Amino acid sequence: MAFIKRLSNTQKIVFGFGMVILLGACILSLPISQTGREQTPFFHHLFTATSMVSVTGLSVLSVGDVYNTFGQIICMCLMQIGGLGWITVMTFFVFSLGEKLSLKNHYLLQDSLNLNSAKNIKHYLVKVYQVTFIVESFASLLLMIDFIPRYGVFKGIFNALFTAVSAFCNAGFDNLGGNSLQMFISNPLVNGVVAALIISGGLGFLVWYELYQKVREMFIHRQYKPTIWKSLSVHAKIVLVMTVSLIVLGTVFTFLSELHNSQTFAKMDTGTQVLASFFQSVTMRTAGFATLDYAKTLPLTNFIFVLLMLIGGAPGGTAGGLKVTTIALIIFLVRTTLKGKNDVVFAYRTISSKAIKQALTMIVFFFSALLLGYAGLLMSNPHLNPIDLWFEAVSAIATVGVTTGITTDLSVLGKIVIMLLMFIGRVGALTVLLSFVSKKEKDVRYAQADILIG
C-alpha cells in the first residue's frame, strides 16, 4: 500500500498497533469468541483489546466469563503481539518463510526494538522467540502442578498457559475470575512463578540477550562469574541494579506500610505478609496481577505503588512506565550536578549527553500525557474519588493494570481517556508525538545564553 510506504518508522509503529487493536476487537466481538452468557457491547471488546495489546490489564469485563476457549486464545495472541511488538511478530514470520528484510525494514525493526544497531538483528530476534517460548512453556508446566488438581486436566493446562503468557508479557490478565490472583495470596508456587515471569519480561530482551551471550562465553572460555559482571554493558548493569533495588525497597516499604492494616496484613501470618509484599513490589512496576484488594490498602501504600508504577521496568521488553534506565540517568545527573562535575558517570563510563536529553524529554512528554489524561478523567468522572482516578491514570499510562475497582464505573469518555493512556504508555509518548512530525528541522547552532535556575 502506497499510504503505508509513505509513513515514517514511528508512524508505522503507531499505525500498526492501532490496526492490531481494531482487528483484535472485531474478532473478540464475534459470537465464535464468546460464551454467550453476557451481552457485551463492541466498545467493551475494544477496551479489552486495547488493554491486551498495550499489555496493561485494566478491564471492564471478566475474560473467563465473556470469552470461550477460542476467544481466550485470541486474547493470548493479542497479549503476545503486544508484549513482543507487532513488527517483531511480522518480521519473525518473514524470516520463517525464508524471506529477507529490506534495509528499510531492518531500520524499522531496529526502531521498534529500541536497538542501537541493526547488526545481527535476525539472530537477536530468533533468541527473543526462543527465550519467550522456553520461559513461558517451563512456567506453564510449573503452574500446572497447582492448576490441574484445582481446575481439572484441560482447564488446568489451558489456565496455566494463559497465566504464563499474560505474566511474561506483563499483561496482568487472568481467566480465573474477577479477583485476579487474590485467592493465591499465600500460595508460594503461584506467587513465585508469576513473579519470576514478570521480572523476566520486565528486564527487557536486550538484557536477556546479553546475559545469554556472556553465559555462553563463560562455558566456552571457562570464565568466572565476576568477569561476566565486569563485561556487561552499562545498560545491563543499570537495569539489573535498579531492578533488584526496587524489588527489595518495594517489598520492605509495602510490608512496613501495611503491617497494621486490619483489612489486609493484620489477618495474615508473617510468611504471607512477606510474600504479599514481595509480589506487590514486583507486579506494581509493570504487570497488573494482584493478590491484594487495592481498595483496602492504606493511602501510604498506594502512594508507594504509584511511585513503583511510574518507574516501571526496563526498555526493550514488555514493561511500561518511565523505565528504570530513565530514572537512573536522572539520579546520576542530579548526583553529578551536586558534586559540581561536568560528566555524568556510571561504572567508569561517561553517559552521553544525548541519552540524558532523551531521558529528560521522555519524562516531560510522559507527565504531560499523564496530567492531560488525569484532567480528562476528573472532568468526565466528577462522581469518583480523585485519588482513585489518579491511581487509575498512572496504572494506565504505565501499562500496569492495577485498579482500586473503579474501571467499570468510569464514564464512556473516562474509558476512552484510559484507552488513550494505555496506548500511549505502550507505544511511548515520545513515539506518538514523533508520529505527527513529518520532517526534521536543520540543526542550526546559535550563540550560548545563560539562564538563572532556582
Image (spheres, grey):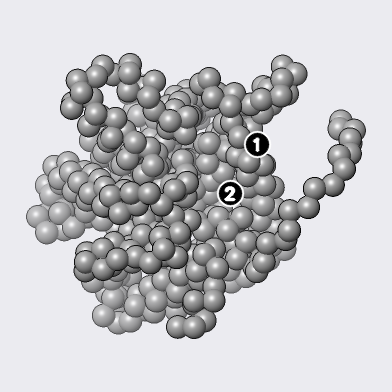
The residue located at (18%, 43%) in the rendering is 138
Vertical comparison of 283 with 171: above or below: above
Quarter-wise, where is residue 247 in the image?
top left
The answer to whether residue 434 is left or right of residue 288 is right
Which of the pair 31/400 is nearer the observer?
400
Indicate the quadrant containing the C terminus: top left, top right, bottom left or bottom right: top right
The answer to whether residue 42 is left or right of residue 186 is right
Which of the pair 198/90 is nearer the observer?
90
Secondary-structure class at tag 2: helix
Q: Residues within 10 Å of mark 1 (few under 14, many from 20)?
A: few
Vertical comparison of 148 with 16: above or below: above
Q: Position of residue 283 (x, y in %)?
A: 42, 41
The answer to whether residue 353 is left or right of residue 163 is right
**Circle 1 is placed at which residue position?**
353
Report how far apart the C-alphas of labels 1 and 2 lie in the structure: 28 Å
Residue 107 can be seen in this image:
yes
Q: Position of residue 412 (x, y in %)?
A: 59, 71
Vertical comparison of 44 with 131: above or below: below
Residue kind at label 2, given as amino acid type = Val
Which of the pair 310/363 is nearer the observer?
363
**Circle 2 is placed at which residue position?**
394
Q: Position of residue 163 (x, y in %)?
A: 27, 51
The number of numbered discs placed on residues in the rendered structure image is: 2
Secondary-structure class at tag 1: helix
